[in-house]
Image (cartoon, helix red, strand yellow):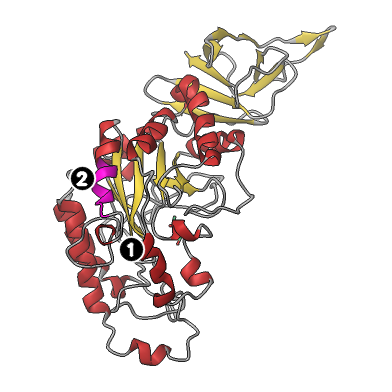
């Protein structure tokens, strides 16, 4: 493949790198089990034993307008949601399967309603589509399947045909990219090549890529098709890179870390690993300071609402973003070394630097490399001036280290999850 320009520099990705923050929604039959979206794998659940969820799926409190309003208030600018997860259940009225929401007691095309609700709030739309499918009769049983250890595995695999499955995926993707208007992101999940796994030849990734580009030329595609050079977005999962990420060609990548509020992706009743609102905000800051986006997951319950724990985290974002969104949107890596206990984000258009103070110091915050470069500084949440000096001293002792600038902060940390100093550079 010919070398290409950094995707960070092309117009198609500009909205995405400006937006920086999206909502990832994982929702399907597994929400009923409330013990992980991978339960079919973890518990080796057979088709017939999983059937009860399909027979009873009826989210009576489903209200995508409430999801969209919560995302908007949290400062999120786009949504990516599971049209189909690994269990194979489809949230839309697909012509190519009976295993779909319109055949459950719910009898609704959820994709249609979710798209409409998020668009109405002005958010961009992304579809997650699982490449893995533990329900489809042509999907060859492999090392991830619920039947992986079954003595009947070989027998069950007889007659299964991944060619037909790949065609099924193209048919479904055609529906998704034709019937719901402009789709901004497509998130395939995922490849695991190697022994008893699956990759580009199984998915027929080249054909899929051509189809996607033809149907929605401006769409942004993730990088999980196992086809080097095919992805627009690099997608680290449940970790935050400490350095900028490079793409296949060695250019600064467009990347998006996907993270969870509590560990699993689907609704999990008993998980005790919920992150605090402060930690959630810190994760957003960390991603943007390293030039990435954050796609934060919520897993609505089987009744269709966001539970109190998720709402608490979203509310933390809402409180913080209302005043500090300027330090996130349009921002990325700063061209300065960071001060101790701080993360920087920087907006190249406005030439403003944002110092996110992770651990509140006693009055003086010393910044390296900024001597002579600061025009004005203020706390972002309330626009109050922060005095800047290159000559802080105490009892005749020089406090500002050589080559540093000192911000004189209030002694008490302002009441915001992470205080931000906005620096207007000369
Ligand atoms: C993983 C998991 C999955 C989740 C996804 C999100 O690959 O298979 O459950 O949907 O990550 O990134």
Q: Quadrant of ligand 1?
A: bottom left
Q: Position of residue 396 (x, y in %)?
A: 83, 7
Single out the mark in the foreground, 2 or 1.
Answer: 1
Percent across and percent down for residue 160 are 29, 84
In the rendered structure, the answer to whether residue 328 lies left or right of residue 341 reads left
Residue 252, quarter of the rendered image: top left
Residue 111 among magenta residues:
yes
Which residue lies at the image location 27% right of the left edge and 40% below the top edge?
Answer: 10
User: Is the residue 370 above or below the residue 245 in the image?
Assistant: above
Q: What is the number of the mark on residue 272? A: none
Image quadrant where residue 202 sits? bottom left
Instruction: Give the residue pinned by disc 2.
Output: 218
For label 1, the SS is: loop
Q: Residue at x 75, y 18 (%)?
A: 362
The residue under the point 45% across, 56% down is 31
Q: 271 or 181, which is in the foreground?
A: 271
The residue most toward the right is 395
Residue 308 or residue 14, whichever sits in front:
308
Q: Is residue 278 above or below residue 134?
A: above
Determine whether, in the image, residue 283 is placed left or right of residue 340. Answer: left
Question: Residue 125, percent across and down?
Answer: 28, 42
Is 395 in front, or is 362?
Answer: 362
Residue 252 in view here: no
State left or right for residue 150 relative to residue 85: right
Kindly report the secondary structure that dominates the magenta region of the rendered protein: helix
- In terms of depth relative to the viewer, which is nearer, 145 or 96? 96
Q: Could you tell me residue 132's position as x and y percent? A: 36, 68
Q: Mark 1 points at which residue?
A: 89
Per the model, the C-alpha gap separating discs 2 and 1 is 27 Å
58 to 225, vertically: above or below: above
Residue 424 at least partly seen: yes
Where are the magenta residues, as a range?
107-115
């Amino acid at each position: 493949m010919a070398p290409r320009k950094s995707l960070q520099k092309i117009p198609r990705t500009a909205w995405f790198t400006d937006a920086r923050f999206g909502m990832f929604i994982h929702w399907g039959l597994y929400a009923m089990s409330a013990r992980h979206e991978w339960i079919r794998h973890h518990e080796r659940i057979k088709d017939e034993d999983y059937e009860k969820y399909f027979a009873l799926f009826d989210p009576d409190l489903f209200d995508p307008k409430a999801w969209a309003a919560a995302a908007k208030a949290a400062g999120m600018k786009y949504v990516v949601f599971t049209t189909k997860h690994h269990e194979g259940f489809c949230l839309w009225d697909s012509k190519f399967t009976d295993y779909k929401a319109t055949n459950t007691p719910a009898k609704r095309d959820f994709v249609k309603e979710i798209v409409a609700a998020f668009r109405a709030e002005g958010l961009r739309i992304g579809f997650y589509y699982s490449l893995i499918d533990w329900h489809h009769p042509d999907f060859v049983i492999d090392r991830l399947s619920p039947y992986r250890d079954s003595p009947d595995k070989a027998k069950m695999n007889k007659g299964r045909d991944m060619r037909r499955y790949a065609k099924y995926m193209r048919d479904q993707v055609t529906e998704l990219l034709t019937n719901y208007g402009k789709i901004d992101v497509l998130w395939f999940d995922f490849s695991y090549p190697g022994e008893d796994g699956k990759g580009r030849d199984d998915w027929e990734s080249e054909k899929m890529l051509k189809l996607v580009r033809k149907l929605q030329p401006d769409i942004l595609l993730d990088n999980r098709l196992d086809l080097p050079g095919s992805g627009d977005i690099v997608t680290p999962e449940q970790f935050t890179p400490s350095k900028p990420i490079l793409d296949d060609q060695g250019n600064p990548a467009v990347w998006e870390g996907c993270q969870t509020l509590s560990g699993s992706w689907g609704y999990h009743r008993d998980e005790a690993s919920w992150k605090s609102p402060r930690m959630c905000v810190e994760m957003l800051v960390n991603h943007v300071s390293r030039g990435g986006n954050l796609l934060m997951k919520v897993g609505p319950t089987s009744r269709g609402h966001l539970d109190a724990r998720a709402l608490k985290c979203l509310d933390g974002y809402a409180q913080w973003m209302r005043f500090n969104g300027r330090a996130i949107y349009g921002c990325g890596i700063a061209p300065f070394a960071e001060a101790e206990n701080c993360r920087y984000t920087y907006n190249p258009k406005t030439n403003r630097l944002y110092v996110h103070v992770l651990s509140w110091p006693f009055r003086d915050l010393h910044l390296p490399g900024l001597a002579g470069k600061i025009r004005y500084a203020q706390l972002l949440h309330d626009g109050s001036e922060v005095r800047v000096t290159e000559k802080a001293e105490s009892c005749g002792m020089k406090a500002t280290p050589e080559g540093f600038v000192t911000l004189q902060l209030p002694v008490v940390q302002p009441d915001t999850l992470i205080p931000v100093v906005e620096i207007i550079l000369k």
